[in-house]
Structures are given as C-alpha cells and as structure tokens.
Amino acid sequence: MIQILILLVHVLAAMGLVGLVLLQHGKGADMGAAFGSGASGSLFGASGSANFLSRTTAILAAVFFLTSMSLTYVVGHRPQAASVMEAPKVEQPAAPAPAAADKPVAPPADTGSKAKDIPK
C-alpha cells in the first residue's frame, strides 16, 4: 500500500518536473527580454517568474529524489512471502547401493584391427 502511494507521488513529481523545465526560459532568453520581448509584463514580473519556477523546480527535484530513494528502500526490504506454488521440499531417503556381483566384469574382447573400421 505504501509502495503505491510513494509511486503515485513519484510519478506526479516527475510529470511536474518535466512541465516546469519546459516552461522555464534558457539562459540566452534574458537577452531577448532586454529588447522588449514582453517578459516584464508577465504574471510574476520580469524576474519573479524565474525565481518562482526555479524554486518550484528545486522542490519537485527534491521530492523526486526522496521518492526514488524511498521506493528503493521499500522494494529492497520487502518481506519475502511464501509462495503457494512452491511445495515444501521433502528429502528422499538415499537409494540402497546395488548388490555387488560375485565375479569381476571382464573387459570387452578385442575384435581385431580397428583400421578396417575407417571409411575410405
């Protein structure tokens, strides 16, 4: 249950990070603002949006990092439940050794030269 909750927060933080990074201006965008691109007329002012978006991105990055570590911990320390599919292992008694023969086994008889067995 806790794993699902952490995973949900993790996915929401990831989507929020992607959105905020796409909303932010690059470092080169400040030059365009100097020539009147209209950044000063935005909702937060000329520098207010950069501070707000940067701080929000940093907070979401911290949440993403913490949920990543939490998911790793929760999955790694999950108790191992016994599976229904696995039957308990029962050791079989050792089979008795075969009875020893009364006379020794003779090696196979030599049937002649092996050279005639080689195909030509």
Image: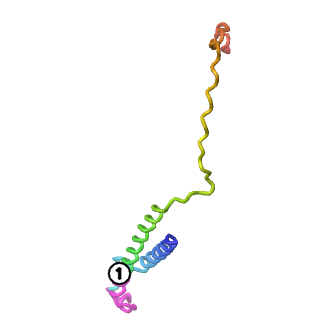
Q: Residue at x 43, y 64 (%)?
A: 73
Residue occupied by mark 1: 55
Vertical relation: 112 (above or below) 38: above
Q: Residue at x 59, y 42 (%)?
A: 91
Q: Is 20 or 62 nearer to us in this picture? A: 62
Q: Is 1 or 67 nearer to us in this picture? A: 1
Q: Residue at x 66, y 7 (%)?
A: 112
Tell me where the magenta segment starts and ends, as one range.
34-53
In the image, taking residue 111 as reference, residue 53 lies left or right, namely left
Q: Residue at x 61, y 37 (%)?
A: 93
Few, some or many residues within 10 Å of mark 1 (<14, 14–19, 20+)? few
Q: Is 88 or 86 nearer to us in this picture? A: 88
Which x, y percent locates residue 55? 35, 81
Decide whether residue 45 is among the magenta residues: yes
Quarter of the image for residue 48 reads: bottom left
Which x, y percent locates residue 90? 60, 45
Decide whether residue 104 is among the magenta residues: no
In the image, taking residue 15 as reference, residue 36 lies left or right, namely left
Quarter of the image for residue 116 reads: top right
Q: Quadrant of the C terminus?
A: top right
Report the number of numbered marks.
1
Which x, y percent locates residue 119? 68, 15
Q: Provide the secondary structure element on which disc 1 rests.
A: helix
Q: How is the image coloured?
A: rainbow
Three-letter amino acid code at disc 1? Arg
Quarter of the image for residue 118 reads: top right
Which x, y percent locates residue 46? 34, 88
Vertical relation: 8 (above or below) 97: below
